[in-house]
Image (spheres, rainbow, N blue to C red):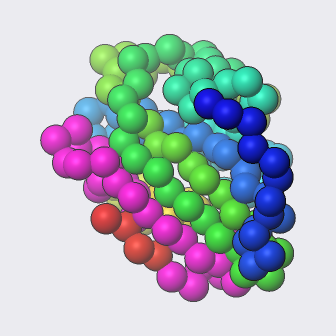
Amino acid sequence: MGVFAQRPHPDGPTAIYLRTLCFVFHGDDVLLIHRQHEPDAGFWNAPGGKIDRGEDPLDAARRELREEAGIEPPLEFRGVATAIVRSTGEHWAIFLFSARVEDRAVVASHEGPLRWAGSGDIAVLRVLPDIPLLLPHVRDPHRPVVLAKFVYSTPDPGTLESADVR
């Protein structure tokens, strides 16, 4: 790979934030974490987080699962989601992974409480709005990888304007 001079597009985002999201399944239930820190404090989400400098997405996903749930299941790449925030120009690229586990044992995290959630729980918990849209695509390992785009008016997750998940 060559070295490229920085040439930001005048209409592009000031930065693209790289993240992972790991959907871990036990039967029909998915592991969720109740976020205690920004971004998304107060919401239930799949474990995951930032990709550190020098990490690839798979290494970051493995690290985040170890840190947030104390587990190291084999992960399968399931796709990429982008999230764009119109008011700030933020652009997030989120690498999606899934895993299946035979054991529900997890280790408490400083990031927030963990919970195994069934489909009925997803409907009543304060989950991020993209989670119910992504779940059918990442749950089934026989489906093709997902490509998703979410557009928000502001950083508030309740301002989802549009979603395209394929």
Q: Nearer the viewer, residue 106 or 85?
A: 85
Residue found at the far left of this picture: 142
Where the C terminus falls, by quadrant? bottom left
Residue 41 can be seen in this image: no
Residue at 46% across, 76% down: 163
Q: Looking at the picture, does residue 60 appear above or below residue 78?
A: above
Number of on-image labels: 0
Q: Position of residue 111 (x, y in %)?
A: 75, 35
Q: Quadrant of residue 27?
A: top left
Question: In the rendered structure, does residue 138 fall within the stretch colored magenta?
Answer: yes
Residues shaded magenta: 133-162
Where the N terminus falls, by quadrant? top right
64 left or right of 103 in image: right
Residue at 22% across, 38% down: 141
Q: Looking at the picture, does residue 72 appear above or below residue 31?
A: above
Residue at 79% across, 63% down: 8
84 left or right of 124 in image: right
Q: Quadrant of residue 109?
A: top right
